[in-house]
Amino acid sequence: MSSNAGDQAFRRRDTAKGRWHEMTYGGALSFLRRNYSRDLSGVDVAVTGVPYDNAVTFRPGCRLGPQAIRAASVQLSELLAFPFGFDPFETLSVVDYGDVHLDPHHPDTVHPAIEAHADTIIASGAKMLTLGGDHSVAYPVLKAHAKMHGPVALIQFDAHCDTWPDDGEAYNHGTMFLHAAREGIVDVTKSTQIGLRTYNDEDFGFEILTSPWIHRNGIAAAIEIACERAGDAPVYVSFDVDGMDPAFAPGTGTPVPGGLASWQALEFIRGLEGLNLVGLDVVEVSPPYDQSEITAIAAATVAHDWLCLLAGAAGARPRPVGRL
């Protein structure tokens, strides 16, 4: 057997492109078996975890989300990507940057630490794929993106608006997008919230496509609205797994019935092809409440398919088979 087999998460040294054989059930875990590295020279995408859940308002546990998503990604690194028909790592240089180091016992240091971590990645020219963690971590990551790109169009997949009114001081996983909107970090006129099924008295300028609306009108209609609204703006996708119905994503802290199926979520992500995608977070995976890892598997697939969109934009050539 070739010496280029197994444990590429730490054994690969020459390049962040390509891949080699791994046992799906063995070896050192990283996201999609990418090598762990803090060297961002020539890197297209840095995957990083934010293991933080002190800002939850109900069930905790999503500090364990990055580990679970990495573990759930192993099968996706084995075959050509479906439905794309290519290996994204023939085109993209991707590393697993590891996790941001946090001191959760000093909460006032958490957001600055996340923002500084994101600043380093984005300043290198790499795009950032963030594995949460609770949804509040999106706020400092968005701040870092806005420094580079200006106000971004936010496409938010969620059961909740996360724009709940507060006293101007609360920064939990249900208020951060109100702060982001008020501070001009996101351009609400270009932003869309997908899958909501909880009530707020105001929309704060966001376009809201609720789950019942999508069930009646179809995921293609939701994709069309979100893409037209974003236009050519830099697009940041924030994917809360509770946007999916608990039947498909039980492993989350604030489950709400009536959500979208995992196939609808994946169709939505794949439908963002052609947008100016600058960043993604996948958040709120809480392994203690998961069943058979189905939430983590869905989360890993969302992140994988977003990478495939980037690979396609960079010139990866699809080889589709069957009726897609």
Image (tube, rainbow, N blue to C red):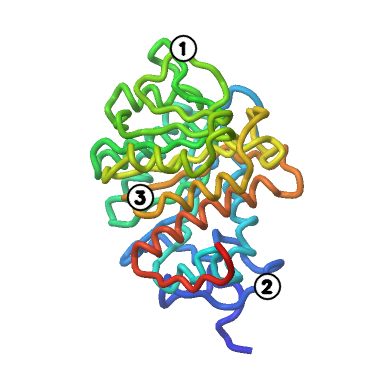
User: Whole-Å distance between the Cαs marked 2 and 3?
Assistant: 32 Å
Q: Which mark is residue 201?
A: 1
Q: Quadrant of the N terminus?
A: bottom right
Can residue 285 be seen by looking at this rendering?
Answer: yes
Amino acid type assigned to the residue bearing label 2 in the image: Met
- Point 37% across, 19% down: residue: 204
Q: Nearer the viewer, residue 309 or 25?
A: 309
Mark closer to the observer (2, 1): 1
Q: Position of residue 221 (x, y in %)?
A: 46, 40
Amino acid type assigned to the residue bearing label 1 in the image: Asp
Q: Quadrant of residue 43?
A: bottom left
Of pointers 2 and 1, the one earlier in the residue sequence: 2
Q: Are marks 2 and 3 in contact (CB under 8 Å)?
A: no
Q: Position of residue 216 (x, y in %)?
A: 57, 33
Amino acid type assigned to the residue bearing label 3 in the image: Leu
- Point 56% across, 60% down: residue: 30
Circle 3 packing at 10 Å, graded few (<14), some (14-19), many (20+), is: many
Q: Which mark is residue 277?
A: 3
Q: Nearer the viewer, residue 98 or 122?
A: 122
